[in-house]
Image (cartoon, helix red, strand yellow):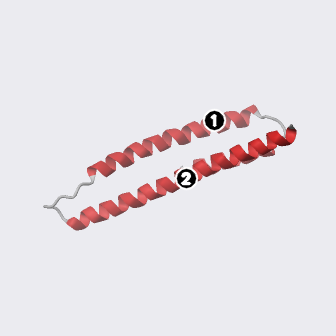
């Protein structure tokens, strides 16, 4: 997903630098965004399922529970940070697009 986010950034930059609208870049951007969104929904569902499967078994080893819980928290945090980066990139692109439109008017 990080690679997809980086390619979205690159496409955003290419669109902002180009003097005219390039339909190939727009189509590529739309496909990358759809791919990113589909992956994020799938990962979110997997994380929810994994989180619901982690339950403290009092008969089992508490250490395993803490390890699984810690791993789940780290994966969730990494996913959350990636989604925050995606949101910041979308906001940055929107702001720069608005600035570009204002400069033309």
- Name the N-terminal-most of marks 1 and 2: 1
Answer left or right for 81 relative to 97: left
Q: Residue furthest bottom?
A: 63
Answer left or right for 25 relative to 1: right
Label 1 neighbour load within 10 Å: few <14, some 14-19, many 20+: few
* Res 79 seen here: yes
In what element is the residue under mark 1? helix
- Nearest-to-viewer mark from 1 and 2: 2
Q: Which residue is mark 2?
A: 84
Q: Which residue is mark 1?
A: 30
Q: Residue at x 33, y 46 (%)?
A: 49
Residue 51 placement (x, y as % from top left)? 32, 51
Label 2 neighbour load within 10 Å: few <14, some 14-19, many 20+: few
In what element is the residue under mark 2? helix
The C terminus, quarter of image: top right
Q: Residue furthest left?
A: 59
């Amino acid at each position: 997903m990080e690679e997809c986010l980086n390619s979205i950034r690159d496409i955003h930059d290419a669109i902002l630098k180009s003097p005219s609208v390039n339909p190939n870049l727009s189509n590529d951007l739309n496909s990358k965004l759809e791919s990113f969104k589909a992956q994020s929904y799938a990962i979110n569902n997997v994380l929810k399922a994994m989180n619901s499967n982690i339950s403290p078994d009092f008969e089992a080893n508490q250490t395993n529970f803490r390890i699984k819980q810690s791993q789940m928290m780290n994966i969730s945090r990494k996913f959350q940070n990636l989604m925050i980066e995606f949101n910041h990139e979308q906001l940055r692109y929107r702001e720069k697009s608005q600035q570009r439109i204002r400069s033309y008017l």
